[in-house]
Amino acid sequence: MKRVRFILSIAVLLAATSCTAQTETDKRVDELLSKMTLQEKIGQMNQLSGGAELKNEAAAGNVGSILNCTDVKAINIVQKAAVEESRLGIPILVARDVIHGFHTIFPIPLGQAATFDPAIVEKGARISAVEATASGVRWTFSPMLDVARDPRWGRVAEGSGEDPYLDVQMGVAMVKGYQGDDLSDPTSMAACIKHFVGYGAAEGGRDYNSTMISERSLRNTYFPAFKATAEAGAATLMTSFNEIDGVPSTGNKWLLKDVLRGEWGWDGMIVTDWNSAGEMIAHGFSRDLKHTAEQAVNAGVDMDMMSYGFIQYIEELVKEGKISEKEIDRAVRNILKLKFELGLFENPYVDETASARVDYAPEHLEAAKQCAVESAILLQNKKNVLPLDKAKTILVTGPLADAPYEQMGTWVFDGQKEHTVTPLTALREEYNVIWEPGLKYSRDENTKDFAKVRKAAAKADAVVVFVGEESILSGEAHSLSNLDLQGAQSELIAEMSKTGKPVVVVVMAGRPLTIERDLANCDAMLYSFHPGTMGGPALADLIKGKAVPSGKLPMTFLRDAGQAPFYYNHNNTGRPNNGTETLLKDIPVEAGQTSLGCTSFYLDTGYGPLFPFGYGLSYTTFEYGAPVLEKAELSENDVIRVSFDLKNKGKYEATEVAQLYVQDCVGSVVRPVKELKRFERITLAPGETKTVTFELPVAELAFWNFDMEYVVEPGDFRLWVAGDSASGEPVSFVVK
Ligand code: GLC
């Protein structure tokens, strides 16, 4: 009994200490809050885009945060005005979209997801924070956690793809990387989990469009990454542009107060997206700008990005009793708490010499290269054309071979193309290179130089064609209805297929494109989601064989954009694929009226996608042994342990991303045909076999059921271990 009492006393002391530490910050917040006028409080809730030109607003206490300024001198000018001229000297919080690197640019987040390597993603986020904070940025609007199942939506580039579990792993890694162990560390910057919520489900993949998502789908698919990153300590959250079933997220009290604050107990700071408060007028949810401010603040928003509604109308709204000062204090408390936690009151200014010491540091570039290597996905490799380890002279062609700006991808404000190493530059270190672009940019339709390219191919041992998208063709407000390669890129590939030389195609894009016809015209294809500053050396190493592809698809690849939305973790429907599909070419003329196959498919493209989620080849082949369950009958408190042998059957040391999928066969609501529950990168020497074991608590099979309870429902389950979401043979188990 004495021991129990001793443990309890320690627990009480620890609790008190942690509360004391938290009270310390809260005490500072409350003390400052008590001195503030209503107008000064409203000033803190106002975020403006700009730099030195905002110094008078800062001196007047009308700006709580600025974004889009990384000129360190300008930042210090605005900060000096806030700290030394405003009545209370509250420092400004400097924000920036540091989405996949600051100066050293990493692969776009969709590419980082393709690594299935949270460690390299966390490292990249940490490096991003070190470089960004050296330039005065202490708050980034990242990670973007929007589950996306429609590649027509340009913003798939910024997220982790279609799977909630992968989204969680990547999002938590980024939050940890940005924020480090202590927000007050000068190299830490506050993360911002966005866009809450459901933005990726925009109708038709048309950005900003309506979403119709049930509460159960929100909870089972769109919430998990936000909940996990909130629990991981994400300091801020951004509301999304879209409305869900008619309610814009920026005015959605159920989302921001009931779920985020109430259910999850998250106490971070909520900022709107750019004028997303003001846009509630266009949505038809608000009468005017004043009404948007009333709705957003009462829904739980703390800070207004660029609608000017808060700064203009909140004082009036408080006087009219439409917003209580209690709500204002709640918002300002969240803002001040963050500023205290970041140490801004102690260290408000940026060292104007710091960035020169950290930008593009060799270890940063090396990490960016490693991430780019791991993010590349080998989609096809006929006759093992890759790696080109015997070729001496290669023809390099295509508009993305030497496009230092495009290679960095979307959402790059501070990456400098002068630092980008392109594939052309890197390949010249490895081969005798003949360089004939063939096309000037990805949308170029002018084929006048194709003859030159064809002639040059005659002198080469192999042809490498770099195609894809200019960076502006993905990202925000860049939805596409057609996902084929733009311009005459497919024609260029087809021309190269006539040369009789081995043809390798490398695609650099911000999204999954429909590249089926291009695959038919080449031997090998590497897919690289805009790989960033060091994409060239990474791709050169992969082409040469100094590195072996290990990337896996974070999104399903379609045969045609008309198949969208398409995702692996779909429901089975009442008429699933039964293996018989009737295609257009099979239908006789004047065919009698029939339901033609009676299942859910397309007459022109059939059932399947081009490539499934989780797919990716290697220069070796991996063989999976049958999964062996430790137990086939489990209770809710058990842990599923499944082991399997993984063998490297080839001649290259290589890494495989082994994936664990589970199906809940029968539920009180229908369940997806399978769901990713674990993955692991496993490196094996040639011929090596390793026994791999995945552990999965049965509790992680919980879902929001018919009664909207988060439970594990007893019953039959199936489980796969495989190299992608469409492979492997299942084993069964029962939860009692
Ligand atoms: C944009 C984006 C958001 C970004 C913000 C600030 O419209 O939706 O992701 O962080 O504005 O640039």
Image: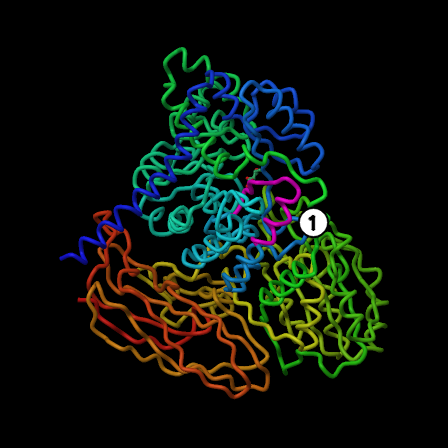
Up-down: is 16 above or below 660?
above
Three-letter code, disc 1: Gly
* In-front residue for pair 424/372: 372
* In-front residue for pair 580/291: 291
Q: Which residue is mark 1?
A: 415
Relative horizontal placement of residue 98, taking residue 461 as reference (left or right): left
Residue at image coords 57%, 44%:
186
The reply to whether the residue tagged 1 has its Cβ within 8 angstroms of ligand 1 is no
Tell me where residue 286 sits by quadrant: top left
Whether residue 129 is in magenta: the answer is yes
Could you say where residue 206 lies in the image, as x and y percent from the top left? Answer: 53, 43
Q: How is the image coloured?
A: rainbow
Which class describes the residues within 10 Å of circle 1: few (<14), some (14-19), or many (20+)?
A: many
* In-front residue for pair 13/330: 13
Residue at image coords 69%, 57%:
361
Magenta segment range?
125-143
Could you say where residue 511 lies in the image, as x and y percent from the top left? Answer: 58, 55
Quadrant location, ligand no. 1: top right
Outermost left residue: 1
Q: Quadrant of the C terminus?
A: bottom left
Q: Secondary structure at mark 1?
A: loop
Residue at image coords 23%, 75%:
632
